[in-house]
Every structure is written in structure tokens, then in C-alpha cells.
Amino acid sequence: MNEDALQSAVAVCEERWKKRLLRERQSRKEAEALLEKKSLELYQLGLKLAEESEQRIQDQEAAYQALFDYTLDGIVIHEISGEIIDANNEFIKMLGVSPALISGLKFDGLHSREHLERVKKARTAIAENGAFRYESELVRADGSEFSVEVSSSLLAFENRSVVQTFVRDLTERNSLIATLISAKEEADLANQAKSQFLANMSHEIRTPMNGIVGVTELLSRTPLRTEQSELVNTIQRSGENLLDIINAILDLSKIEAGRLKLEEKPFSLEDCVESALDAVKGLASEKSIELLCEIAPEVQDGVIGDSVALRQVLVNFLGNAVKFTEDGEVKLHICQKGLEQKKNGSAVQKLVVKVSDTGIGMEQEVLNEIFKKFVQVDGSTTRQYGGTGLGLAITQGIVNAHKGTISVKSELGIGSEFSVHVPYRINIQVQPKRRRLYPDKRLLLVEKHPSILAWLTNECQDLGFEVVAFGDPISAGRYLGESDIAFDVALIDMGMDLLDGFEFAEKMKALPGFRETPLVLISCLGAETLEKASNASPFAAYLAKPVFRSRLDEVLDLVLTRSEGGADSVIEAQERKKRSLRVLLVEDNPINRRVAMIMLNNLQHEVTEAVDGQQALDLLEQRGGDAFDAILMDVYMPVLDGREAARRIRKLMPENGPRIIALTASALPEEKDEILAAGFDVLLTKPVRIDLLDEALSACSD
Ligand code: ADP
């Protein structure tokens, strides 16, 4: 290469290096500028972040401080040993101390002297479990004390453990509780006063009602023209309605005041059911409604409980069922849904009591409403059917008190069914009766009503009879005429179409081979039928509807024993013996004395009158203890009241004294116990009904 070529090559190289250097310088400059820019950006971002996090911390601190200062509870942070590190405004306000002084105080020392022990316990518990809550009293700066709830827990603070304690002032809560207690006490007192007022009112109203209802009953037994007798009936019905209302209001007030006291006494379920059915029998037979009663065989009859309460439930259901049914039947069914043996040897049977009817029924929507007070599905029912709308509310109250349940099913135009599930303790003293069986006897049954026919067939088959049953007298008559089968006994319904029970019985007796067959009349009529039956020779005995298992057993036993040459007359055995009694009547109210006097005369008893307890005692002392068979005595009287008089009579004649029957217008259960405890044997509530008076006195004839 020559010199020139070499120089030009060097120049080219230099040029290239220069350019490259320039480019590199340029790039470095750009890189430095970029670096500077990015550093600046980073620096600014760092600054922003730092500001933001500081702001967040500040916000959090402010929120905590606000919470700390303005919460409704006092908050104290203190050492485990109790020295206060910090406290919020609320706590300072609670104690009434100056904020500057608070951090010098010891939390434990703020408690009242009596609570120091509790604080010590709290300290140990916090150390062991990390938290503890207790109630105590703190002392304010002015020396006054106030109740607090304290809840403490351990807290990590500046690398050590401190205690954070929440203090809630209970002054307001306690005063609210005190106000509530006193309001409740006041309400209880008012309720008691209301019940007392109702009891007094009921007493006041019953006394003149005794005059009205009693005199009306007596008046209805005298000869009256048709119009007069209708008027007397109206007075009687109105009086009874008024009494029902008074009783319902009184019952409800007892339930609402929680004063419903249930008795624990042995009773027979069947007797209770019979007495409830008795109460509605009259109306049912007036309306030609068939009353049915089925008590399942497994139900134990002897129970312990409150028979009056059960009767009331049954009467309410049955009364409504009969009231709201125009034709068809009302059925009471009792069965057992379980038996519970207790460890102490007693047993409880869970009973299901159902009352169903074929009446007007109800729509589904109203079924939940009818158990409320004063509710009637249709307000006009009161006009058409009577009633207060209280019956089911009372029934529910009674069932609840028995720890039972109540339910209803109903369909408009088809009928209703009310059910109660209720437990009853079995009375182990009463052994279930052994039924006499008739394995080789044949029984004829003629009964119009299909349900009764089915029930009686079943029952008689259970007793071992061969049963031949007919639903009408014509087919039964045809059968008897055509076959030569003999029967040992026949049960015949009284109210059959075409041929009534009497006519059928006479025709049957006229057939050869049936002259000696004992016939039993089944009827829903009462004593009148019995009388007619005893005059009309075809019948050997009488069975009242609804037929009870025990009655059926009794009657079959009697007629079959007699046909075997046993008892003389079944009718006679069924009639109660009666004799005239010497009764001492003690009553201050002249009208009521007159009413009782006439009733006793009507019942053919011999009466001596006294106007107060003292006069009665004087008479007893003069004439001697055996001068009277019974004493019928008012409870409230001037000079010497009935209770005191009864006590003295019992003292005077501790043994074999006359039976003392109390007359009272009060219906409170606690009073009833008190009256009986004074020495009375039995209690009659005014207005007195002649049949109940007769029943109470009949015990003296035994
Ligand atoms: P009341 O004294 O009016 O009968 P209850 O509390 O016993 O009061 O009954 C409330 C209402 O429930 C009745 O007025 C009636 O409308 C309805 N009711 C109760 N039982 C029956 C029933 N067996 N059939 C139809 N409606 C009934």
C-alpha cells in the first residue's frame, strides 16, 4: 500500500471513530438524562408513598382515638399490676376525676371495698386465661358508688403485656330493670285486684241471681197457662245465659291471672264424660241429634287429675258441637296414644279426646282465630246460637295448664272435629274391672242409628255374645217370625221409624218363644222413659244413650242374672231409694232462704230455719246432734258466718254429726278449699239447682 492510500485509510478510520465517539457520548448523555428522570420519579414516588402511609397511620390513629374517646363504655389501659397507662374520656367522665390525674391511679383501687376480693380473683383469671368478665362497683371522685360490668383482656403494647379493660356503667340498666320489676309488680297487683274485683262482682251478681233462677225454677213447676210458661222459660234461659257469661268471664280472668289451680284427685273418666254429656243431652234430644260416646277399651278409667277442668273442656266442645249442628250426630271419642311408666311406679296415659260433629263447619282461614277471646266466626251466631266467644279461649287455657295440646279440623258444611292430647296419671289403686263374659248366649240387637248399632255389636261380641243385629224393626220382626232361633237377651232402640221400641217389644213378646226373653230398652230419654218402661211390662231394664261400656255390662249382668233367678227387679235396682230428711236451713238472705225452703219442701224434706250461724248452733245445742240429717248453710252471714259455724259444729259433734252442705256465691277455687277445710262436706254454688241440691242431700239417705 502506498503512502497516500495509507493516509486516506487512517483518515477514514479516524472519521469512523470520531462518529462512534460522538454517538457514544450522545447515548451516555441520553442514558444519564433518563436515569436522572427515573431517579427523580422514584424519589417523588417514595415521597408520596411515605406521605400516604403516614396519612393512613394518622387516619387509623384518629379512628382508634375517636373510638377510644367516644365509645359509650369506659376503656382503661393498665399494667397487669393495675397502674393506669391511659383511659378514655368516658371512663374519666364516669369517675368524675380530672384527666391529668388519671394516669397516676391504680385501677384495682377504684373498686369499692366490698368488691376487692372479686378484683383479686379477676387478676388471677386474666393471668391464667388472658381474659375475664365480672360485675362490680366503682367509687367516683365524690365518693359515690356505681355498678359496672368489667371485661378485661391482655394486650401486647410496646413489646410487653398490658391489660385493656372495658367498663360499662350499669346504673341505667339497673334502674330500667328496677322500673320493669316494679311495673310488673304493679301489673300483678292490678291483675290481682281485677281478679278480686271480678270475684266480688261475681259474688254480688250470683246472690240475686239465686233468687231469680231459683224462683223461676220453682215457678215453672207450678200450673201455668201456656203463655205464662213460655215467659217463665224465657226468664229461666236468660238467667242461665247470664250465669254462663259471668262464669266464663271469671274463668278467663283466673286463667289470665295465672290463678288456674288444677286439682290432683282420683276420678273416673267415664263418670266425668257422662256428666259432661248430661249437660248437652237436653239440647241434643230437642234437636234430634244423636249423641255418641266411644271410650276405647285400652283407656284406663281411674285417673288422677282435675275432673272439673276436664268436664269443662268436654262441655265446651260438646256444647259447641250440638249448638252448631242441625242434624246428624255429635261424637265423643277417647283413646290412648301411649303409656309411660315412671320410675316411681306410677304410670301416665296419653289420652286423645275428640269431639266431632256433622254441623255447619268452618272455613280453613278462621280456624286459627277461634281460640282467641271474644272471637266468633260469624258475629250473628250470638243471636242465632248464643255464646260469648270465650269458650274456646278458656278451653285452650285449661288444656295448656294440663301441658296438653288442642287442634281443630273443619270443613264448611260438612262438620268439625276438635282434638285434645292430654296426659293423665293413672290411679293405680283402681283395678280395671273384669268384664263378665257370655260365651254361649245369643243377643238380638235392633238399633236405628248405624254408628250405635256398629259400636253395640262390637261391644257385645267382645262380651262373647253371638249377636244378631238389625237396623230397623221391620227386618228384625220378619227375621223373628221366620226363624225359630231363641235369644237370651234383646237390646231394642226406643226411637225407631215405623215401629217404636215399645211397639216392637210388644210384638216380640207376642211371638212364641220370646215371652221370657229379657228385653232392654235403649233410649236417649231420661227418667220419664224409665217410668214408662217400668209400667210397660215388656222391658226388664233400661239403657240411656249414649251407652257406656260399664252401664252395658251392668245392665246385661242384671238382666241375665235375673233371668237365671237372681235379682228381683232390675228397675227397682236402678231406682234410687229416697227418704225424707230433717234439714236445718241456715241462710240470712230472706229471698234465698225462701227459695231454698221451697226447694227442700219440693224434695219432700222437713225444714227448720235459722238466720245465722249462731242461731243454728243454738238450735243444735237445744235439740241435740241427731235432730237433723243435714245442714244447708250459707257461707257469708252476719253474727256468726258459715265457716266459723261449721268449725264449731264439728267441734260439738266430732263424730256422726249431720252432713253440712255449704251454699256460696263465690266460685274461686282457693275459697272452695278453705270452705271445705272449715268442716263442710260439700259445696253448692249459687244459684242452686234443685237437682244438684237433691244429689248433695241424697248422700244423707245412704
Ligand atoms: P261461643 O261461646 O261463641 O261458642 P267459643 O269460643 O266456644 O265461643 O267458639 C268460638 C266460635 O268458634 C263460635 O262462635 C263458632 O263460630 C266457632 N265454633 C266453635 N265450635 C264450632 C263447631 N263445632 N262448629 C262450628 N263452629 C264452631
Image (cartoon, rainbow, N blue to C red):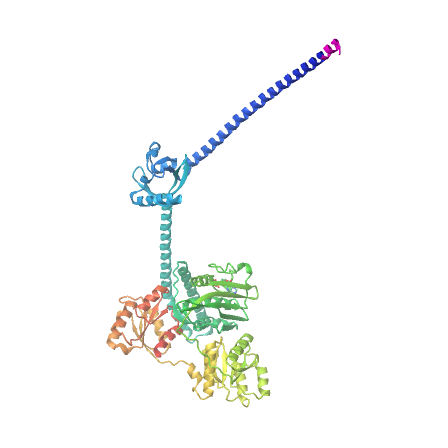
Q: Nearer the viewer, residue 486 or 70?
A: 70
In this picture, is 51 found above or below 122? above
> In the rendered image, which quarter is residue 21 located in?
top right
In this picture, is 72 found above or below 588? above
Which quadrant, please, contains the C terminus?
bottom left
In this picture, is 563 found above or below 523? below
486 horizontally vs 150: left or right? right
Q: Is residue 60 something one can see in this rendering?
A: yes
Specify whether residue 367 is painted magenta: no
Q: Position of residue 262 (x, y in %)?
A: 39, 65
Outermost residue, bottom side = 512
Q: From the image, give the main secondary structure of the stretch colored magenta.
A: helix
Query: Could you tell me which residue is drawn at 65 percent across and 18 percent down?
Result: 24
Specify whether residue 4 is painted magenta: yes
> In the rendered image, which quarter is residue 219 located in?
bottom left
Outermost residue, top side = 3
> In the rendered image, which quarter is residue 136 located in?
top left
Which quadrant, please, contains the N terminus?
top right
Q: Nearer the viewer, residue 465 or 97?
A: 97
212 horizontally vs 443: left or right? left
Q: Position of residue 675 (x, y in %)?
A: 32, 67
Q: Position of residue 169 (x, y in %)?
A: 37, 42
Q: Nearer the viewer, residue 565 or 464?
A: 464
Highlighted magenta segment, given as a residue range = 1-9
Q: Position of residue 660 (x, y in %)?
A: 32, 73
